[in-house]
Image: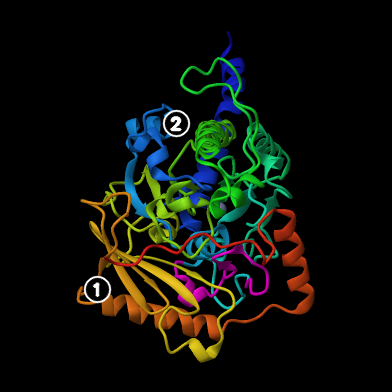
Amino acid sequence: MRDSQKAKRFVPVLGALAVALAVFISLKSRYGGGVPPTVIFVVMDTLRADRTSLCGYEHPITPKLEELVERGATFACNSHSPSTWTLPSHATFFTGLGPEDHQAGSGGNTKGMTWGSVTPLGPRLPTLAEEMAARGYQTLLLSGNPVVGERMGLTRGFDHAVVARSYPEMHDHRLADRLKLILQYLALDPDRPLFAFINIADPHAPWRGIPKGLGFLPARPPMMIDPGRARFESGEMGEEEAEAWLSHLSDVYDYSVLRADRSLTQVLEALEAEGWLDAEYRLVITSDHGEYLGEHRLVEHGRPYFYEPVTRVPLLYLSTEGEVRLPDDVPSIVVHSLARDGVLPEPLPSGLASVFRKGSERSSVAVPCSSSSAALWLRASKLVANRGEIVRFDLASDPTEEHPLPAGNHPAAAKLLEYCRALDRAYASRPVPDAELSEALSAQLKALGYLRDDDEPPPPQPSKPH
Ligand SMILES: [Zn+2]
C-alpha cells in the first residue's frame, strides 16, 4: 500500500479524534474542568421498605435493587418519607423543604383524600429541575403517577414532562417504552448533561393479577382497592373474608413491587442504551410513601397517620463520583441534596414527616397540629403529634406500634410541637388555588380514585397511651 493511501485511511480517524477532543475541551471549559454527571432520580411510588428483598423481605421481589448494591450502591432501609402521599412528598423532594415551607398538599383527613383544600406546589420556591437547568442540565420528567403533573406544580423547571393520565397507563414495560421513544426522538443534546426524574408507579393501586408459574406467589386475579377498603376499614367485613381479602391484597402488592423492580431495570437499560450512563452519573432511588396493607385497620396511604408501613421507605444511592455513606435511618428529604450535589446535606436534617388535614379553621390553631399531624424519629423512638396530643412508640420493643407511650416529658416533644405550630401556620396562610384550578384538581383526583364521599365512616383513631 502506498503511503498516500495509508494517509487517506488515517484522515477519518484523525478527524473523529479531533471532533472528540473538541467536544471534550468544550465540555471542560463550559463546566469548569469537570463534565457534570448524568443525574437519574427515581421514585418507586408507594414502595414500603419492608416489602423489598433489599431490606430483608422473604420474597425475591427487588433483584435490581440488590444488584445495584452489589455494584456499590449505598442504601438505607429505615429511611422515612416526608409525608404520606404523593404531592407533599414530591414537593419536598423537589424543593428540599418540608410541607411547613412548601405548603403543598392537604386533603388527608381521616376519611381519605377529601376535596376542598388541595394546594399545589406554588411558584415561590426554586425547584430541583430549575436549579439543574441553571447548571446547564437538560431536564426530563417521566411519571407513571398522574399526580406528579403540571396541575400539582410538580413539572416546573423540566424542559420535557411526560405524565400518565391514569395509573395503569405507564405500568409495566409501558414506562420504559415511553422513555425509549423520548430518548430517541426528543433530540436531547449529547453535549449537555441530563437530569431525568422518573416515577415508577407500579406499586400504586389498581394492582394487576398474578400469572401462574411465578413460584413464590400464587396466581391471583387483578384487584381494585374499592369497595373492599371501605368495608374492611369500617369493620363491616367479617373476619374470614378480611383474612382472604388481605392475603389477596398482600400478594398483588408484592407482585406490583416485582413489576416496579423490572420497570427500574428497563428504565436503566434504556438510559444505558442511549449512552447516558457511559460516563459519570448519580442514581438516586427512593419512594414517596409506603402503603397500609391492613395494619391498624388501614389500607392504602394518604391519611394523617404515620405508622411505619406508610412512612418507612428504602433509599439507595449509586454514583461514579465518590463515596457517600447513607446512615440507615437517613430521612428521605436528603434525595434533593444527593441529586443536586451528590452529597448529604450538613447537618443532616431531622427525621420528620407531616401532612395537612382538611377542615380545620383558624380558631383551633391554638392547639398544635390541629390543621396537620406530624411524626419525628429519633433512632428507635418515634413521636407522633395529632391535635395537640403526642404519643411515643419504641420501635425496638414494639415494631408494630401497638403500644403508644406517653411522650410529654420526652426531650423531643417540645421540638415536635414547635414543628406542629409551623405546619399549622403554613396551612392557615397557604395559597388557595383559584376556582378553575380547584375544579380541575378536584376532577383529576376524583378520576384517580383519591376523593371519597364525606359520608364514608372514618377508620378508628390510633389508640390512646396506656
Ligand atoms: Zn405516591
Q: Residues within 10 Å of mark 1 (few under 14, many from 20)?
A: some
Amino acid type at image mark 2: Lys
Name the residue nearer the viewer: 440 or 396. 396
Q: Position of residue 315 (x, y in %)?
A: 39, 48
User: Can you tell which mark lies on residue 412?
Assistant: 1
Q: Which residues fall within the magenta stretch?
A: 96-119
Q: Position of residue 422 (x, y in %)?
A: 42, 82
Residue shown at the point (63%, 50%) measured from the top left = 145
Name the residue nearer the viewer: 356 or 287. 356
Placement of 147 over or under 408, stated as above or below = above
Q: Position of residue 88 (x, y in %)?
A: 53, 65
Amino acid type at image mark 1: Ala
Q: Quadrant of residue 59?
A: top left
Q: Is residue 9 magenta?
A: no
SS at circle 1 = loop
Q: Which residue is labeled 2 in the image?
A: 64
Residue shown at the point (67%, 65%) measured from the top left = 455
Q: Is residue 97 magenta?
A: yes
Q: Residues within 10 Å of mark 2 (few under 14, many from 20)?
A: some
